[in-house]
Amino acid sequence: MSETGLTALDGEIRDLLRFAAQRSMLPRFQNLADGEIEQKGEDDPVTVVDREVEAFLTEALTKLAPDVAVVGEEAVHADKSVLDRLSEPCWIIDPLDGTANFAEGKTPFGIIIALADAGEAIGGWLYDPQSDRLCHTRKGEGAFINGEKIRAKTTGQDRPVVAVSRMFLTEEQSAMVDAKLAPHYSLVDIPRCAAEQYPRLALGENDVSSFKRTLPWDHAAGILWLNEAGGKAARLDGSGYKVDDPPEKPGLVGASSPAIWDTFMKRLSG
C-alpha cells in the first residue's frame, strides 16, 4: 500500500477504532459478566470484547484492503499458522491491549493496529478509547497524535525514569535490575498496556522501558511510532524490530531519546 494510501486511511481507521470502542469496549468496562472472561494461559485472560473487536476490525480492514492479510492476536491463539502471514503485506491487530487491566476493571487499555510489508511495519495506530487519543504514524513521515506531529521528549529528570516489569523476569534477571539499574534510575512499574507505554516514552512520562516478550500485535505499531517521533526502540542486540522475527530473538528496549537508549544499554551490559 502506498504512503498516499496510508494517509487517506488515517481518518477511516480512526472511525473504525472509535466505533469498535464505543460499541463493544466502553459499555463493558467494569461491567463484564462472569462468563465473559476466560484464561488462555497463566496471567493471560481473554474477554468477549477481545473477540468481538477483532472480528469487527478483521472484516472492516479486509474491506478497506482486500489484498492485505490480517493477523489478529486471537486468531493466532486459535491457529498458529496465521503467523505465516507476517512476512507478507498484513494488518496486525491487538483488539484489546491491556486485557488484564480491562478484565479487572482498571485502566489503561487500548486498541493497536499495525500495517506491515515484508516484515517491516509501515503504519501504526495506537488508540486510547477513554481519551479518544490516537497515536499514529507512517514510515518516514513522522509521529502524530490526533493529527498533530510530535517529537519525543525526555522526562528531564536527573535519574531517568525506567518502567520495568519483573513479571516475566527470572530471579537472576531481577537481581540484575537491582544491581545495575536501581542505582542510576528511578524505577516505576509498567502500565501493562503497550498502547499506553509507548506514548509515555515520547510524552515526557518515562525515559526507558524494557520488554522481554516482543509479540508483533503489542509492539509493531509502537516501535515505529516511537522511532518516527525521534525516540529509539530496538532489540537488545541493537538490531531493528521485524514483525516476523523468530520468537528466540532477544527482547527490546524503548527510550525517549537515542542517547538515553545508548546509556541504558551500556549500564545493562556493563
Image (cartoon, grey):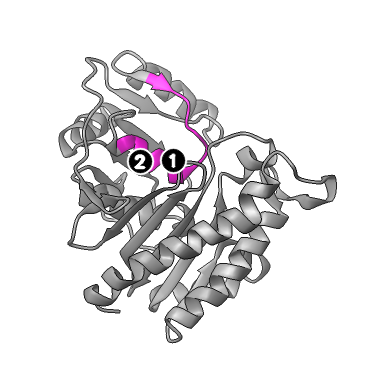
Q: Residue furthest bottom?
A: 67
Q: Which mark is residue 196?
A: 1
In the displayed structure, does residue 179 sit left or right of residue 16? Answer: left
Nearest to the observer: residue 186 or residue 93: 93
Residue 212 vertical placement versus 16 (above, below): above
Q: Which quadrant of the figure contains the N terminus?
A: bottom left
Q: Residue furthest right?
A: 35
Nearest to the observer: residue 156 or residue 83: 156
Which picture quadrant has residue 201?
top left
Q: Can residue 135 be seen in this snapshot?
A: yes
- Is there a contact, CB below 8 Å, between mark 2 and mark 1? yes
Nearest to the observer: residue 213 or residue 93: 93
The span from disc 2 to disc 1 (Cα, nearest Å) is 6 Å
Residue 130 vertical placement versus 218 (above, below): above
Which picture quadrant has residue 157?
top left
- In the rendering, at what x and y percent does residue 226 appear? 28, 47
Residue under the image location 29 percent in, 30 percent down: 207
Examine the structure image and report whether residue 15 is included in the region drawn in magenta: no
In the displayed structure, does residue 165 sit left or right of residue 238? Answer: right
Q: Which mark is residue 228?
A: none
Give neighbour class at mark 2: few <14, some 14-19, many 20+ (Cα, 10 Å). many
* Span colored in magenta: 187-201
Per the image, label 2 sits on a secondary structure element best described as: helix
- In the rendering, at what x and y percent does residue 209 appear? 37, 35
Residue under the image location 23 percent in, 75 percent down: 4
Q: Which quadrant of the figure contains the C terminus?
A: top left
Per the image, label 1 sits on a secondary structure element best described as: helix
Residue type, label 1: Glu
Residue type, label 2: Pro
Residue of label 2: 199
